[in-house]
């Protein structure tokens, strides 16, 4: 017969079995403390779970290691819109760090994050994305002196989409002019490293972390962590690849006055359209390595213009790239 609960039995006999094991397999009574990393490792070992760990910002080091003699900047901005000519920066985040000639990241040496009240109300779409409200920026001003102390000694400024951040920063202050810039979106082969996309959310998630996105300093720390990791199957960090790319010159070719019906061929070859509002010629354009210039000019002359045209060519370094116009 099935057993029944005896309400007249002694109290201990009526109590439920406290020796039952929980999912991690240990008794509940008098069991040793189990740390979170051990629990996470056990879940991952089943093959049924992927664990995202909260990204912990690297500490600021007052006495950085001398073996990392170069200085870099990770920078991010939040703005009222997409046009640097009429929209404004409402938040800037900067992390200064050291690195060596081989592209190994050393120490974080400084952090700054500041808000700025714009001349207009922050659009609701921007508030939804960033969490920054008019009340948060009321009366706030970015500390230019503090920014300058970090930016001035740096050799390289890195932004995740430098083509967006650099024009805004140069419109905001001259301290950003005449600096070398690198783009961690376009100058790293993320797909070749096994990532599903180049958005920071993809990169940080596939690296095993999560963070508070769309706030400038948080995004800077997230990017620094991704750049400094060496994923399995890769011989170098993403930052080493980025640093090497930043040292190479590039050539921008403008297919000015190309026929309208040639647009599909140009797009298929990687050309992008500029409407002239950013200071560039109103034309299709492409950026490539100097060694590829002769082949590109041959393509334009034989497939697009079909005569011995001389399209405009602009030679670029990290000091010129990602500027407006």
Image (cartoon, rainbow, N blue to C red):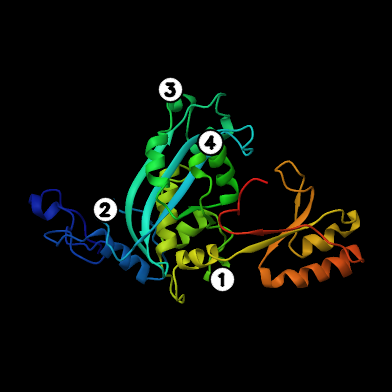
Identify the residue position indicated by label 3 in the image: 139
The residue depicted at 56 percent of the width and 54 percent of the height is: 319
Q: Is residue 23 visible?
A: no
Q: Could you tell me if the residues under marks 1 and 2 are in contact, i.e. CB atoms within 8 Å?
A: no
Could you give the CA–CA distance between mark 1 and mark 2, rounded to whole angstroms? Answer: 33 Å
Q: Earlier in the sequence, mark 2 or mark 3?
A: 2
Q: Position of residue 196 (x, y in %)?
A: 56, 63
Q: Earlier in the sequence, mark 3 or mark 4?
A: 3
The residue depicted at 23 percent of the width and 63 percent of the height is: 21
Horizontal arrangement in the rendering, residue 118 relative to residue 18 (left or right): right
Could you give the CA–CA distance between mark 4 and mark 2, rounded to whole angstroms? Answer: 29 Å
Q: Nearer the viewer, residue 132 or 25?
A: 132
Identify the residue position indicated by label 4 in the image: 172
The residue depicted at 63 percent of the width and 32 percent of the height is: 86
Q: Position of residue 151 (x, y in %)?
A: 42, 46
Q: Earlier in the sequence, mark 4 or mark 1?
A: 4
Identify the residue position indicated by label 1 in the image: 192
């Amino acid at each position: 017969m099935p057993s029944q609960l005896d309400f007249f039995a002694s109290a201990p006999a009526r109590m439920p079995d406290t020796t039952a094991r929980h999912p991690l397999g240990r008794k509940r009574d008098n069991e040793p403390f189990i740390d979170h990393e051990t629990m996470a490792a056990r879940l991952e070992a089943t093959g049924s779970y992927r664990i995202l760990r909260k990204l912990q910002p690297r500490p600021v080091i007052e006495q950085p290691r001398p073996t990392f003699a170069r200085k870099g900047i990770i920078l991010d901005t939040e703005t009222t819109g997409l046009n640097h000519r009429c929209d404004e920066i409402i938040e800037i985040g900067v992390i200064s760090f050291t690195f060596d000639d081989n592209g190994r990241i050393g120490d974080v040496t400084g952090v700054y994050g500041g808000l700025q009240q714009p001349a207009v109300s922050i659009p609701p779409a921007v508030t939804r994305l960033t969490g920054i409200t008019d009340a948060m920026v009321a009366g706030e001003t970015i500390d230019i002196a503090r920014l300058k102390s970090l930016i001035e000694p740096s050799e390289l400024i890195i932004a995740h989409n430098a083509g967006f951040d650099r024009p805004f920063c140069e419109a905001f202050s001259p301290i950003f002019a005449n600096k070398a810039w690198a783009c961690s979106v376009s100058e790293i082969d993320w797909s070749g490293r096994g990532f599903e996309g180049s958005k920071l959310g993809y990169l940080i998630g596939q690296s095993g972390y999560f963070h508070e996105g769309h706030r400038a300093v948080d995004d800077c720390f997230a990017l620094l962590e991704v750049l400094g990791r060496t994923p399995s199957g890769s011989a170098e960090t993403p930052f080493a690849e980025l640093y090497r790319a930043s040292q190479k010159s590039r050539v921008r070719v403008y297919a000015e006055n190309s026929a309208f019906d040639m647009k599909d061929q140009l797009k298929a070859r990687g050309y992008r359209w500029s409407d002239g509002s950013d200071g560039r010629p109103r034309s299709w354009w492409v950026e490539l390595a100097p060694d590829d210039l002769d082949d590109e000019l041959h393509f334009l002359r034989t497939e697009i213009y079909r005569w011995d045209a001389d399209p405009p060519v602009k030679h670029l370094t990290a000091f010129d790239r990602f500027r407006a116009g």
